[in-house]
Image: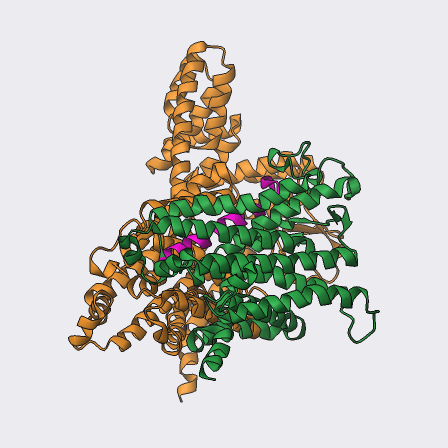
Chain colours: A orange, B green
């Protein structure tokens, strides 16, 4: 009986789960209110005035009660309620009729009939601070070093006599050096504020190079208004050092943004580098092939809505195939009649781009479609307090490099690549050697178009997917290819990255639009100086 | 006499100028003299529409001059057209005076809106018509001269030139979209009241603009025809067909290109200046690279290197555009795109090429 097999396999797990639940409920019963006077006392205090609530919190922390963290978090998140008629405490994640309410003391669940019967355990600012401190203190004892570090950072932000005492207690016991250093920095910041002159000087030395923002605030204060001129001067020096570092990391960030923008440009342009560079065909429909790739991503995502993470991986080959097929159709249907007449090709392919745009508009509506970003692509990598890198940009950069390497490999290491290069260098000779030049043309164009489709997958993660997506990138792609030197993949890579970086470097002081204009003007002037781009093709193939 | 000489052997041109002349006389009469409702009455709306088409035809002639005869596929001529339009638009803005929404006698509405307290320096002088008219010629001309001097001297040619002309108009579009540029940003210049004291909404002014457009087209056509009939025209064709050879024989190719390119840009500027009062607005969208490419297609559809073909193409496609975008907006881009493909594949000599072949075989 094949159907029952999964059920049989699951039976032991089911049994285990039952056991665990049973044990849990027993243990909860064991520490129910009757056997736990502290908790019972706390629960009576929590429904009263703020003073009493503060006492309750203090009591929890003092007695080191095992459920302290849980209760404090519930209060902090506003999920702790009490029932008005008997003052019993309940955990209510969603306060609405029909939702679950779990009794805090005996863990029995009831269904809320009227939300009016329950009232939230409210907080004032004083208590919020108290709870934050208590939680941080608990966090300091956590098993996970990352959590301990976060707790120290939290305390560093709101230093007080109590938190300093807590940190002092902790520093000897801390096994991880990174966390220990951070505690030292926190203590030093305290010294900066409250210590005598010697302590302040030592503290300045200790915090030097730290990028935590409270450090900077404290140092600024000292540098401005310390009584001792020596301390003042040293603080200023340390501050300058920190600012220098922040500037440096700012530059790293700009560079990162620039490279990621450049990667987008390279991705958009590299397909064109093949069709325009290798074949000499100006494909104005290139942008629309990118657009088709983006729409393919959208369709794939619609087809597999429960597997967003995988859909993007499926979309890459799918987009390649769709765009490549359309590309081959364009080549067979139109472009092959126009070889040797680049300007006519330009017009004809422009016509095709209009048709593709309108086709997409008719099929998918003129509105933008949103493609969602899978979870594994979103988020940040925090390098240090002033520098964190967006993951999606990182993936784009990696993806761009991957596509680039793959293309170079195809052109340099495969029979197709050999034939493509042969035809682009000398068509007549290649034909004489038995290369089917027409087939090679179609394949090359398909390859370039397919890469455009793959670029569309990447772009769908960055911008809206709409009928005008292609137009937005066509001029940029041409700029990248022309700037890099036609017929040169490496030129395209260098050009794309440098234009991206130039754009991002100019942006802070010129604004996004003006930066773009400046880059365009620069390219126009550059072409005057070097009409064949950064890396011109040499030899006979370059003429014409 | 001079006109007859210029049009010798130019059947298309003779017919075209003849038709234009008839229109110049007939349209005003049919609009003003024939009462509304009569079958022969030409409504003012149609007059303005025709005037608009004629300015676009002039733009097409300018493009045909450089593309048809000189082989420079410019994808940036809309930039010169729009610059001419902006120069005229600035004059018209100044004519509004204190009749704007904010009633400020010195500043156009958008500047009041942006809280500017003085007119930027490049707006001074535009309250004089002669100055604006001069700028209509000078600004596009100067830009074309500088751009051309750089590009042609360094022998940027073929598709490279096409791409950087496109970059030029794209950069200008981005620039004019910025509010800080002082040209009305996104909204451009609009809400014009009068031109040389004539109310822009009145039938008479509209007819005047139509006649001016037709005359400008005729003069522009004649100018291009005269230039291309002479020695210069033959050098141009030589440059188009064998640039290196023309250079080796001793012609200064870059000077020829530069001169013709500049003249063409000025013609485009005039076309833009006549276009703006008739449509009543100029905004950065006119710089869009798409517009420039569209002009090239008019020329291609009409027939390259004929001049009258450019006019025919511009009129036919723009009429089709007006018709399709109103009746079947879904179909328009399909039709235009298909036209691009079909004309380049099947009709390398354009629509007028069809007629000429018949003529030759008859």
The quadrant where residue B217 appears:
bottom right
Identified at 38% across, 31% down, the residue is: A245
Q: Quadrant of the N terminus of chain B?
A: bottom right
Residues A471 and A6: in front is: A471
Residue B339 lies, in percent from the top left, at 51, 74
Question: Residue A309, percent across and down?
Answer: 43, 65
Horizontal side of residue B219 vs A373, given as left or right = right
Q: Is residue A57 above or below residue A450?
A: above
Q: Nearer the viewer, residue A509 or B236?
A: B236
Main SS, magenta residues: helix
Boundaries of the magenta span:
B158-183
> Within the magenta stretch, is there residue A261?
no
Q: Residue A536 location, x and y as percent?
A: 26, 52
Residue occupying the point 28% across, 61% down: A544
Report the number of numbered marks.
0
Residue A120 x, y percent position in the rendering: 69, 48
Q: For residue A374, say whether it is visible.
A: no
Confirm whether residue B54 shows in the render: yes
In the rendered view, would you say A116 is above or below A249? below
């Amino acid at each position: 009986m094949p159907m029952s097999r999964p059920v049989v396999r699951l039976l032991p797990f089911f049994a285990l789960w039952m056991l665990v639940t049973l044990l849990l409920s027993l243990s909860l019963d064991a520490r129910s209110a009757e056997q736990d006077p502290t908790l019972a006392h706390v629960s009576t205090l929590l429904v009263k005035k703020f003073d009493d609530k503060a006492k309750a919190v203090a009591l929890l922390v003092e007695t080191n009660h095992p459920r302290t963290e849980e209760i404090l978090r519930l209060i902090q998140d506003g999920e702790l309620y009490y029932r008005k008629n008997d003052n019993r405490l309940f955990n209510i994640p969603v306060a609405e009729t029909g939702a679950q309410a779990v009794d805090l003391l005996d863990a029995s669940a009831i269904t809320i009939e009227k939300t009016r019967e329950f009232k939230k355990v409210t907080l004032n600012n004083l208590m919020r601070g108290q709870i934050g401190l208590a939680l941080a203190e608990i966090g300091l004892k956590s098993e996970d070093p990352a959590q301990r570090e976060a707790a120290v950072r939290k305390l560093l932000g709101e230093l007080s006599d109590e938190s300093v005492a807590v940190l002092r207690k902790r520093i000897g016991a801390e096994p991880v050096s990174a966390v220990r250093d951070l505690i030292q920095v926190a203590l030093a910041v305290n010294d900066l504020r409250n210590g005598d002159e010697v302590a302040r000087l030592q503290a300045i030395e200790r915090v030097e190079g730290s990028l935590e923002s409270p450090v900077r605030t404290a140092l600024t204060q000292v540098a401005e208004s310390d009584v001792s001129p020596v301390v003042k001067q040293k603080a200023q020096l340390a501050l300058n050092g920190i600012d220098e570092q922040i500037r440096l990391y700012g530059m790293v960030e700009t560079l990162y943004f620039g490279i990621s923008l450049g990667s987008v440009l390279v991705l958009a342009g590299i397909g064109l580098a093949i069709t325009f560079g290798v074949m000499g065909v100006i494909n104005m429909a290139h942008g629309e092939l990118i657009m088709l790739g983006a729409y393919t991503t959208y369709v794939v995502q619609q087809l597999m809505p429960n597997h967003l993470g995988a859909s993007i991986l499926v979309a890459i080959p799918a987009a390649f195939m769709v765009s490549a097929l359309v590309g081959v159709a364009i080549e067979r249907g139109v472009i092959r009649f126009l070889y040797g007449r680049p300007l006519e090709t330009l017009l004809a392919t422009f016509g095709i781009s209009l048709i593709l745009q309108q086709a997409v508009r008719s099929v998918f509506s003129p509105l933008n479609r949103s493609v969602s970003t899978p979870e594994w692509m979103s988020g940040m990598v925090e390098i240090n307090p002033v520098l964190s890198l967006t993951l999606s940009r990182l993936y784009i950069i990696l993806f761009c490099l991957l596509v680039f390497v793959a293309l170079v490999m195809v052109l340099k290491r495969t029979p197709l690549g050999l034939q493509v290069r042969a035809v682009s260098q000398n068509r007549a000779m290649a034909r004489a050697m038995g290369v089917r030049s027409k087939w090679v043309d179609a394949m090359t164009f398909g390859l370039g178009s397919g890469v455009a489709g793959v670029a569309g997958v990447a772009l769908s993660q960055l911008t809206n997917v709409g009928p005008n997506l292609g137009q937005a990138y066509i001029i940029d792609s041409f700029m990248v290819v022309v700037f890099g030197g036609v017929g040169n993949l490496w030129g395209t890579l260098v050009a794309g990255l440098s234009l991206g970086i130039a754009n991002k470097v100019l942006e802070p002081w010129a604004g996004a639009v003006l930066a773009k204009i400046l880059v365009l003007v620069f390219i126009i002037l550059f072409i005057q100086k070097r009409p064949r781009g950064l890396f011109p093709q040499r030899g006979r193939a370059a003429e014409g | 006499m001079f006109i007859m000489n210029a049009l010798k052997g130019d059947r298309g041109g003779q017919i075209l100028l003849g038709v234009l002349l008839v229109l110049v006389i007939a349209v005003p009469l049919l609009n003003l003299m024939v009462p509304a409702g009569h079958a022969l009455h030409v409504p003012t709306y149609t007059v303005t529409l025709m005037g608009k088409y004629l300015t676009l035809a002039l733009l097409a002639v300018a493009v045909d001059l450089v593309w048809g005869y000189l082989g420079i596929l410019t994808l940036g001529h809309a930039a010169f057209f729009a610059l001419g339009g902006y120069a005229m638009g600035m004059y018209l803005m100044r004519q509004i005076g204190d009749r704007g929404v904010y009633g400020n006698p010195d500043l156009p509405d958008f500047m009041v809106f942006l809280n500017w307290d003085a007119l930027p320096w490049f707006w001074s002088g535009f309250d004089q018509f002669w100055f604006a008219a001069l700028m209509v010629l000078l600004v596009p001309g100067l830009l074309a001269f500088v751009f051309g001097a750089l590009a042609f001297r360094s022998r940027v040619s073929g598709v490279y030139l096409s791409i950087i002309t496109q970059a030029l108009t794209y950069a200008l579009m981005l620039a004019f979209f910025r509010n800080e540029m002082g040209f009305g940003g996104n909204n451009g210049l609009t809400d014009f009241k009068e031109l040389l004291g004539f109310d822009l909404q009145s039938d008479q002014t509209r007819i005047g603009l139509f006649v001016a457009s037709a005359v400008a087209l005729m003069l522009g056509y004649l100018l291009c025809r005269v230039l291309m009939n002479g020695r210069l025209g033959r050098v141009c064709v030589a440059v188009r067909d064998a640039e290196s050879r023309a250079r080796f024989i001793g012609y200064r190719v870059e000077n020829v290109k530069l001169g013709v390119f500049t003249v063409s840009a000025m013609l485009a500027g005039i076309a833009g200046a006549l276009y703006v009062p008739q449509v009543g607005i100029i905004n950065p969208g006119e710089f869009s690279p798409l517009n420039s490419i569209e002009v090239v297609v008019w020329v291609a559809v009409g027939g390259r290197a004929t001049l009258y073909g450019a006019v025919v193409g511009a009129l036919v496609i723009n009429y089709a555009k007006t018709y399709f975008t109103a009746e079947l907006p879904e179909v328009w881009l399909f039709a235009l795109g298909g036209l691009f493909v079909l004309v380049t594949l099947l009709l390398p000599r354009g629509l007028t090429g069809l007629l000429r072949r018949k003529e030759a075989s008859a």
